Image: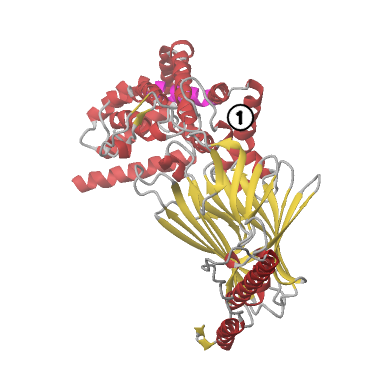
Amino acid sequence: MEEQGKFDKNSVIGFLLIGAILLAWMYFRPAEEPQPNNNNTNQVEVDSSTTSKQAVKNTSTVAKTNNNQAALSDSLQSLLNQQKFGAFAYSAMQANQLETDYTILENDVLHLKISNKGAQVIEAKLKKFDTYDDKPVYLVKDGNSNFNINFTTKDNRNLNTKDLSFIPELITNDNSSTLNMRAKVSENEFLEFSYTVKPDDYMLDFNIESQGLNNVISSKIANLSWDLKAYRRSKSISYENRYTETLYQYEGDIVSYTGQGDEAIEDELDIKWFAFKQHFFTTILLNEKTFNEGKFTSKNLVQDEQIDTLYTKAFKAELPIQLANNEFNENMNLYFGPADYQLLKTYDQNLDEIIPTGWGIFGWINQYIFIPFFGFLSSFLGNYGLAIIVMTITVRIVLSPITYKSYLSQAKMKVLRPEINEINEKFKDNAMKKQQETMKLYSKTGVSPLAGCIPALLQIPVFYALFQFFPSAFDLRQQPFLWADDLSSYDVIFQWDAYIPLVSWIYGNHVSLFPILASIAIFIYMTMTTGQNMQQAQQPGMPNMKFIMYLSPLVMLIFFNNYASGLSLYYFISNLITIGIMLVIKHVIIDENKILAKIEEKKKKPKKKNKLTRKFQEIMEQAEEQQRKKNK
């Protein structure tokens, strides 16, 4: 027999021993006793004492035979275990005597089932949460997870912990429960996986240690691998899949992710932790030390949303473990729980970076303003839908000065439009002169066409931050409001089962009301802000405002049909408030006649030119002079 390219003499010796035991058993087994002849019709009486002695003898023979067979079976099993597991055969024989194949480890929030084979978690249930269809939330169940450490031994065996048998020992006290799982070489030599749960905590202490194995293990490095397929838990599998990915921290405090392709592979150095994030729930492995490197693979399992409805993605993590003198000594942690920003932040391990709050200024706005403020509102109001509305009103009021500046700029441009149209008509054949005269007009009146764009740009960080906030807000999960039964998922007013090509792929098999309301509000808002700009002729190189006015509501209607209804509710309320603010500004605050009077007054005043304006005018005049010479 060959293993790893070498002839294994232990295997031959094992098979020879098995054959010798079989031959010895066949040779030395007791002969069968001849059966008494009961066909003699003349025999009327039977000696009861003789019969009793014969029965005792037969029983003794059967018992002896059974004991011999049991001993043979144990010997055969021992030899097979020796052949397969080498020194760890000792543990396999002890495991055969156990009454159950797993041990339950739990607290008030977690229920874990840990298998004797492989000492790995084969079931992880979150007690306080249900899926969209009222089933318990399992992060691990029915073989979707496979945790393994691979190492080699000095007798040239390539062993995997997932195949080894571990002997459990459960220790429980008031503050914690610890499960020690040992794969034994002897009573004092073993590989141990230790799990400790604490009250009301989703984080476990997870230690991997060994004792007395320096003469057994030959590896300098053991290879840890973890495969996990993420279960679907939301109504929209495509929406949930968008937020399902592997994240990891490396090279200090850098956090990255594998991405959203059909298959993504990332390799990095100095891995501190990694997470198999499943939108609103996550599984995390942290190490007190750092793994020297790590390889992470994410594969999309949803190719057809009508068929692939059980899993979203398949994850795989591969990391090396450095052994000290051929011994394990790893202090780690496991997390099975919600992807809740506030909860993950309490562990002070940079785990809150798992939640996509946005990068740079967008993340800061969420982390330091919106997340704390929304938490306060929801705890104070007790209704998450009302909290969204109050938060939206607050944001719009804070941004109302910017809205005022933007609309004031539009009003000034509207007042100047007749003069701009006159310049365009007068110099329609001379683009440079037309541009020069237009700039002079802006300079005289103090009006800038960019004045309306800058306030709009200032609002972008807020809008993008909220776009990141609502889909990731764990508190919105399964919270109802009006007709929406879950603010973290889409609301439904009508749905159908039949698959309609293109429609079902782009729009879905349902109609959501909040995106429709938000689309109408956006259309009205776009009409108010861009409608007056559409009255003038389209300038070359400028965007088609009419096209934008119709495109934005259409994108909202289609794209947000499968998005969180809480986000659509925000956009609907936000645009309603903005429309109201603009109507007040237009009819109460701003008087176009006064604006025109101020502009005319500014025209009469000599305007002091700054260096930039003078330089720009000189460039324009030089260009005009060159153009005139060229025409001559």
- Give the image location of residue 398, x and y in percent: 57, 25
Name, please, the residue furthest toward the top: 588
- Left or right of 578 in this view: 147: right
Q: Percent from the top left, x then y, of residue 582?
A: 45, 18
Quarter of the image for residue 50 reads: bottom right
Specify whether residue 411 is painted magenta: yes
Residue at image x 61%, y 58%? 120
Left or right of 45? Residue 488 is left
**Principal SS element in the magenta part?**
helix
Query: According to the image, label 1 marks what residue?
Result: 374
> Please, is residue 557 above or below residue 268 in the view?
above
Amino acid carrying label 1: it is Phe
Q: Vertical placement of 536 versus 19: above or below? A: above
Q: Nearer the viewer, residue 34 or 442?
A: 34
Any magenta on residue 393? no
- Extreme right residue here? 174
In-front residue for pair 406/47: 47
Q: Residues within 10 Å of mark 1 (few under 14, many from 20)?
A: some
Residue under the point 41% across and 14% down = 592
- How far across and down, in percent of the image, does residue 621 sit? 34, 42
Judging depth in this view, the residue of 452 and 470 nearest the camera is 470
In this view, which residue lies farthest toward the front? 42
x and y, in percent, of residue 350 in the image: 65, 50
Residue range in magenta is 399-413
Residue drawn at x 28%, y 23% as measured from the top left: 535
Q: Secondary structure at mark 1?
A: helix
Residue 546, image quadrant = top left
Of 573 and 447, the residue lying toward us:
573
